[in-house]
Each structure stands twice: as structure tokens, then as C-alpha cells.
Amino acid sequence: MTRLSPALGLAVLVVLAAGCVTLPGGESGPTPTAAELEAQVDDADPPSAATATVVSERGDTVAYTEEMWLRDDGATNTETTDGRFRNVNDGEWAWFYDVGADRVTVIDANRTPDSHFAYLYDTQRTYFDELDVAAIEEATIDGRDTYHVTFEPPRDETVDTDITVLVGDTEFVIPLETSEADESAEPVADRIDVWIDQETLFPIKQELEGEGIDRTWTYTDLSFGDDIDDERFTFEPPEDAVVAQNVHPYGRSVDSIAAAESETNLTVTEPTHLPAGLERDSIEVSPSLAGDTMTATLRYVADDRRTLLVSTTTTTRLPDGAGESVTVGGRSVTKVESQFGTQLAWTCGEQVVSIFASAEFDLETAFAVAESIECGAESN
């Protein structure tokens, strides 16, 4: 199983250790049993809207603080208080703005979870489905009554799955492979703790602890059900920013194509034709937002901010959306055009190869680059 690195710069590769303690409380006590609390979480509906401040900590150090606005229709806005990042989902597009890099990534909103609320609640359901509840206690967090739940992996059961977690605006993947081959592996983290609001069943706080890992995310100043103006969920990219469509917003850089292939189990091929002035700027690897595929992306940038991306993904599923089938170099290609540029994608064996050419390039240039990437029609 490929072990995925974090999507947004969080370097976490986790193998959770086994172990179980007696569950406190009981059916006759005020604290619910694991089954009772799981049933409550399963039946919970997210509030219509919320605002919060999310504090992310590494040990005793605050890594970042975000202001967050959420609606149950999927509209989301998060802004780091230091002004470095802003992420906005307006229902049609999900925008990721890295201010320092002057880089904007935009993804079709239907490629992201329907609602950040729903994602958070679904993650809790995944914990209950895949892990054992080691303890439940009552605790007060930021003035709210919560159930503090400690999750650990099953002790006597082989687990062969991953859990993708989005806390605040940080996504990471927890590999939970505990097969016989892994029994001798030294544990890195040994539990996940979640503080669940008793009224809304919202995960107010999450904590990951273990050897080399000490991360905490806390939602403070929570306010539920308030009306949030639509203007809060609009975004206009700066005129001088590089805008790239339908690639992962925060890929992790590697130093060679060989390293990218090793980490993703992909075959990555560079184009033999590039427009004048373009040079390879970076090589990145990333999991999808859903955590089910891996992508290696070659990024080419010109001094005038023209951008070309060549991506290879561990899937045979072509992009969703209003695409048009065209023939390029004897192969069937799905073409998707938008205000941001042109995306061309095609299957290549058990992979999908795609290019994204920013709006400065004409369609013929995009076709020429695609045709120069080795993978003939016989691989389709």
C-alpha cells in the first residue's frame, strides 16, 4: 500500500499502535457508551452555518491560526491570520491562494467535499467505523460541553485502509495498515483524541499524539446558525498571480522525476515540445483531495507568468465536467476549456496523463505539447 504524505505541507506518516482500555461510563450513566455516541454522530445534521477561529499547534507552538466561515451548502472561506493563505469555495470553484508564492490554484467545486461541515462529520463516522473507542469522558472546551473520545486501532483485527482527515484547512492521511508485516514496525502515533460538542456533535478539537507527532487543532469562538453574507465566499485572483486549474493546491516538492515515480508508483514522461520561454520550475507529488489517487505534476513557468502543468495520476478515470472528446496525435483526448486555460487529459495504460495550459496559450500550442508526450494510442 502506498503511504501518502500530507497534502498541505503536514509531514505525517502514521502507523497507529494497538491497545485498549476499559470504556468508562455505561448505559445508566450520564456519559454515553461508544455505541450510543456513534448512533448520535451517525444521525447528526451539520448546522446551517458557522464561524470559528481554528488554532493549529505543533506541541506547545502555534503553527498557524485561521478564521473560518462555513455554510452547509458547501460555501467555505478560510484565511490565515498572518495573511499567507486564503482558501474560498464559492460553490462553482474552490480557490487556494498562496500569497507568498503569488500562486492561485482553482479546482472545480464538485471535486471537493460537498460541504466542509459534512466532511468533518463524515470523518468522525470513519473513526467510529475503523477504530476502537478506548475512552469517553466529559470535558469543557472553550466554554462548550464536549465528549472527549480517545480512538485506537483494533488490537485483534487486521486493518488495511487509510483515513483521510481534514482538520481546519489541513488535510493528512493516516495509514492504518496493521498486517503481520507491520507488527514489528515502531509506532509513530498511538491515538486520535476528538472533543465532540454535546449540542451539535461538531468536532471542536482533535489531537494526534505519538512518537514524533504532537498535533492539535482547536475550533474557538464558535458561532452556529448565523447568516453569512454571500460576499464572504467570493474571490477574485490578483491580476499578477499565476492561476492553475484542477491540480492539487499544495503539492509537495521532490527533487527529481525518479523520486516522483518512486513515491507515486507512476511512470512520468516529460513533453519533448515546450513553448518558447518555459522552463521546468518544480516537480510535485500529492494525493487527491479525496485521498484515493496519487499525482505527479511537472510545473513549467515563464517570466511572463505563463504556466504549463503536466500531471500523471494513478487512475483511469478522466476528468468530470463538460468535456469534449477530440483527437490529438492519434489518441482520444478529453478537452476542458475554462476562463483559466485549457486542460487535455487521456488514459495511458493504468494512468491518466493531463496537461493544463494557462489562458495565455492558444489551443494549437496545448495540442502540440500533448502530442509530444510519449504514450501512443496503443496504450489507450
Image (cartoon, rainbow, N blue to C red):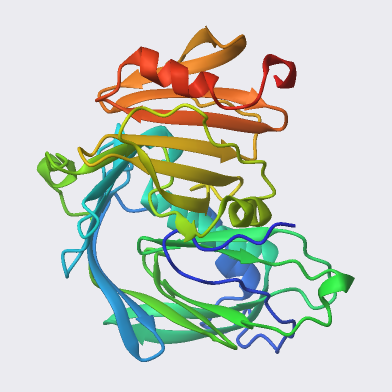
Q: Is residue 94 visible?
A: yes
Classify residue 116 as left or right of residue 312: left
Q: Quadrant of residue 66?
A: bottom left
Q: Nearer the viewer, residue 126 or 88?
A: 88
Q: Nearer the viewer, residue 269 or 326?
A: 269
Pinpoint residue 194: horizontal percent, then vertical percent: 49, 75
Q: Residue at x 24, y 25 (%)?
A: 360
Q: Nearer the viewer, residue 371 or 114?
A: 371
Q: Residue at x 61, y 9 (%)?
A: 330
Q: Residue at x 37, y 63 (%)?
A: 200
On screen, residue 249 above or below 56 = above
Classify residue 68 as left or right of residue 380: left
Could you tell me which quadrant the N terminus lies in? bottom right
Pinpoint residue 99: horizontal percent, then vertical percent: 20, 56
Pinpoint residue 246: horizontal percent, then vertical percent: 40, 36
Pinpoint residue 239: horizontal percent, then vertical percent: 11, 39
Q: Residue at x 38, y 13 (%)?
A: 364
Q: Please count the marks in the image.
A: 0
Farthest-out residue, bottom: 60
On screen, residue 63 above or below 67 = below
On screen, residue 103 above or below 9 = above
Classify residue 197 as left or right of residue 358: right
Could you tell me which quadrant the C terminus lies in? top right
On screen, residue 186 above or below 196 = below
Q: Is residue 321 visible?
A: no
Farthest-out residue, right: 180
